[in-house]
Amino acid sequence: MIIRLERVVPFPRDDVYAWWTDFREDDHRGHDSPAASRRTILRRERNEVWLRDRATRPAPATIDERVILDPPNGYAVRARYPGAEARYKYRFEPVPEGTRIVLRAEIHPGHLGRVLLPLARRSVQRYAERDTDFHLREMTKDLTTAGSALRPPR
């Protein structure tokens, strides 16, 4: 299954890249986040970051992720979910309005997921949209002057 979405934000690509790749342990702790998880940053080495998310919402799961950074163009992730492997990329493209953020995800289900995932395609797409939009709202708060005065820098 392939999921693709894009959004345009009114911020320079370098700022978007810096915000989006500033991985933090509380990245999914906002009250309006579609996910609830506790992130552990396992290690950072050159342009790679290893993460482990222990999610409680939308379903309990442990997700191991390997992130490969490609500054300032974006990053790629290989993630192991219960029942599926996922590869996704975020691309940050400069456009006259600011930056276009493009997400492309490939989800490869295993065993029972081969039957269930196609049935849940719309839900998976909606979840990706809600999660991306949550992070865009957080980024907007952090990158605007009024929001920056209220929150610590990322």
Image (cartoon, rainbow, N blue to C red):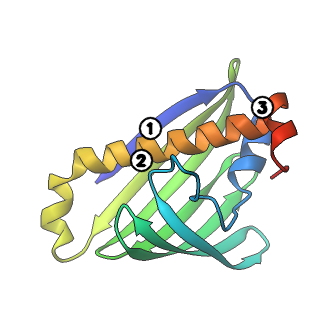
Please indicate whether residue 72 sits to the left or right of residue 80 in the image.
right
**Mark carried by residue 5:** 1
Compared with 77, 118 (above or below) is above
Q: Which residue is mark 3?
A: 12
Q: Which residue is mark 2?
A: 128
Can residue 148 be seen? yes
* Label 1 crowd bin: few (<14), some (14–19), many (20+), radius 10 Å: some
Secondary structure, mark 3, is: loop
Q: CA distance from mark 1 to mark 2?
A: 8 Å
Q: Amino acid at mark 3?
A: Pro
Please indicate whether residue 47 sits to the left or right of residue 38 in the image.
right
Relative to the observer, which residue lies in front, 57 or 61?
A: 57
- Point 87% across, 37% down: residue: 149
User: Marks 2 and 1: in contact by CB < 8 Å?
Assistant: yes
- Point 20% across, 69% down: residue: 113
Q: Earlier in the sequence, mark 1 or mark 2?
A: 1
**Image quadrant containing the N terminus:** bottom left
Relative to the observer, which residue lies in front, 93 or 81?
A: 81
User: Marks 3 and 1: in contact by CB < 8 Å?
Assistant: no
x and y, in percent, of residue 121 in the image: 23, 49
Q: Earlier in the sequence, mark 2 or mark 3?
A: 3
Q: CA distance from mark 1 to mark 3?
A: 19 Å
Q: Amino acid at mark 2?
A: Ala
x and y, in percent, of residue 151 in the image: 81, 46
